[in-house]
Amino acid sequence: MSDAYPDNSTLSASKVPRHVAIIMDGNGRWAERRHMLRFTGHKAGVDAVRRVVEVAGKRGVEVLTLFAFSSENWRRPKKEVGLLMDLFMVALEREVKRLNKNNVRLRIIGHLEGFSEKLQMRIHRAQTLTAGNTGLTLVVAANYGGRWDIAQAAKQLARRVEAGEIRADDIDAEMMNACMCLHDLPEPDLFIRSGGEMRISNFLLWQLAYCEMYFTDILWPDFNEGVIDDALASFAKRQRRFGRTGEQVVEGEGGA
């Protein structure tokens, strides 16, 4: 991990999830409760992202994936979507320098062709600038949907079948996984959703198969070090069996 984010947690390194995925929910409600415009909540949400990225780096998390804009979010009022795109542009410009300084590698996943050419260029520049960094990998899912991810993987394999490179019977879960957006990263260990909703909302449907879930009523702009540490502490108490019995897990840990 980067020296820019020294680990000051008392949590055992073996109990820290390698990959944390978060749905950042509640920006609009946070603003409405304060009688502010919804967009004010989205701007406050960017501050929360900054805090959470720093805490993740301190705690030794290797990958942090944030759901910033889903493929369904285009259904929101046109003005709000436009403001979100503007905020995304500004955040990329301002935050990428901070990320690069702290050895964070930025990666954007999703159907990026759906964005303007200007935004696509800015995304490319941000990813290129941080590509060589070796600390935390920050993945931002934008214009992303879990069903889209699975469908685009299926299309890749279908084209290979059409080209005669593989047979349909050759296709298995491993081949599908190799075509997914996060194929080269560890699968999420811990999923967190803010804002009180208890669903995964078309986020990383394939990758969350064995992920531990953590839901909280706290709205995203209020996320801070304490909230993240509560989620990490909850994860550390859980026994991950992956289809095995509890006794098998204990025996395996003892053998290790």
Image (cartoon, rainbow, N blue to C red):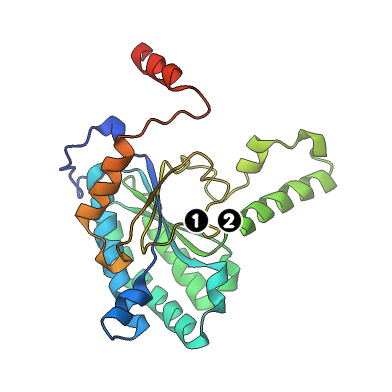
Residue 248: x, y in percent?
A: 45, 17
Q: Amino acid at mark 2?
A: Gly
Judge the density around disc 1: few (<14), some (14-19), many (≥20) Cα neighbours within 10 Å: some
Residue 222: x, y in percent?
A: 25, 66
Residue 124: assigned label: none
Q: Is residue 148 left or right of residue 66?
A: right
Q: Residue sitting at 30 percent across and 36 percent down?
A: 236
Residue 98: x, y in percent?
A: 26, 62
Q: Is residue 41 above or below residue 206?
A: below
Q: Residue sitting at 46 percent across and 42 percent down?
A: 211
Q: Are marks 1 and 2 in contact (CB under 8 Å)?
A: yes
Quadrant of the frame with the C terminus: top left
- Name the residue nearer the viewer: 139 or 116: 139
- Name the residue nearer the viewer: 174 or 233: 233
Looking at this rendering, what residue extends furthest in the top direction? 255
Residue 146: assigned label: 2
Distance (Cα) linking label 1 and label 2: 10 Å
Q: Secondary structure at mark 1?
A: loop
- Name the residue nearer the viewer: 10 or 180: 10
Viewer can see residue 91: yes
User: Where is mark 1, residue-wise?
Assistant: 200
